[in-house]
């Protein structure tokens, strides 16, 4: 499933019984390790989070009602080059060693505590109604728009602006984001605890 989602199709739908999003990632990673596709846990997990765009989590409560409890987006964390070459500017050996130690600290932090993904709830079920809790990421907004016809793009753009204040502009066949990064930056991403916004 992970392999076909990477190369063979525009989208892949599958079901799983994990209770939380991290459990889903861990279960899929472990399945890939058991199947012998990968031997390294981090590499297997990287492949999983590249495929998981959205998790639609369904529940059945004690009354027998089935409903979507939450829609969660998986956001892979890009590995940024944060190393510095400032040691070349240092005149003393002590200064050069300090800069070296700074780079070494960054290296070991990346090696031991590498965060491969973040996850945020886009929509949650609260007291009988669905509420929006976090905006969709810029990357997924672009990909979603690229796979819509003109009428769907128009309605989706209205939805983005109405609920998250994200304005999109269109020139001919090219889509240009207007303050998309600012809108996403202003709305601090939170997993839970934020006052939810009712879906309009």
Image: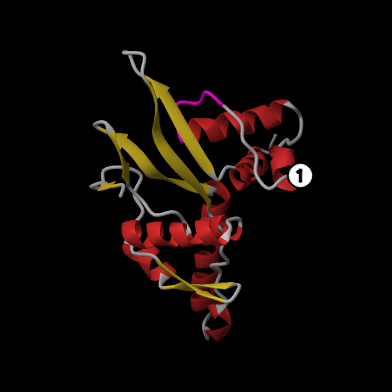
Residue 149 in the image: x percent, y percent?
Answer: 58, 58
Q: Is any atom of residue 105 visible in this view? A: no
Q: Tell me if residue 68 is in the magenta stretch.
A: no
Q: Tell me if residue 19 is in the magenta stretch.
A: yes
Asked if residue 13 lies left or right of residue 141, the reply is right
Q: Which residue is mark 1?
A: 8
Residue at the limit of the structure toward the front, as seen here? 151
Q: Is any atom of residue 157 visible in this view? A: yes
The secondary structure that most of the magenta stretch takes on is loop
- Asked where in the image residue 84 lies, by quadrant, the reply is bottom right
Instruction: Please tell me which residue lies in front, 92 or 56.
Output: 56
- Asked where in the image residue 158 lies, by quadrant, the reply is bottom left
Residue at image position (66%, 27%) is 31
Residue 144 in the image: x percent, y percent?
Answer: 55, 55
Instruction: Please tell me which residue lies in front, 86 or 131.
Output: 131
Instruction: Please tell me which residue lies in front, 129 or 70.
Output: 129
What span is colored magenta in the figure?
Answer: 16-21
Total count of labels:
1
Asked if residue 24 lies left or right of residue 197, the reply is right
């Amino acid at each position: 499933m992970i392999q076909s989602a990477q190369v063979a199709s525009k989208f892949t739908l599958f079901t799983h019984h994990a209770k939380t999003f991290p459990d889903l990632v861990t279960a899929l990673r472990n399945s890939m390790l058991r199947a012998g596709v990968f031997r390294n846990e981090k590499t297997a997990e990287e492949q999983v989070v590249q495929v998981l765009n959205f998790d639609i989590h369904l529940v059945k409560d004690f009354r027998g009602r089935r409903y979507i409890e939450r829609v969660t987006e998986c956001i892979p964390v890009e590995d940024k080059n944060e190393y510095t070459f400032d040691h070349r500017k240092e005149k003393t050996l002590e200064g050069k060693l300090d800069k070296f130690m700074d780079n070494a600290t960054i290296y070991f932090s990346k090696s031991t505590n590498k965060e491969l993904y973040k996850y945020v709830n886009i929509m949650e079920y609260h007291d009988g109604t669905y509420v929006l809790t976090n905006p969709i990421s810029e990357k997924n907004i672009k990909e979603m728009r690229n796979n819509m016809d003109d009428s769907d793009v128009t309605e989706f753009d209205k939805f983005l602006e109405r609920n998250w204040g994200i304005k999109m502009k269109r020139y001919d066949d090219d889509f240009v984001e207007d303050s998309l990064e600012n809108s996403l930056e202003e709305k601090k991403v939170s997993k839970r605890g934020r006052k939810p916004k009712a879906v309009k």
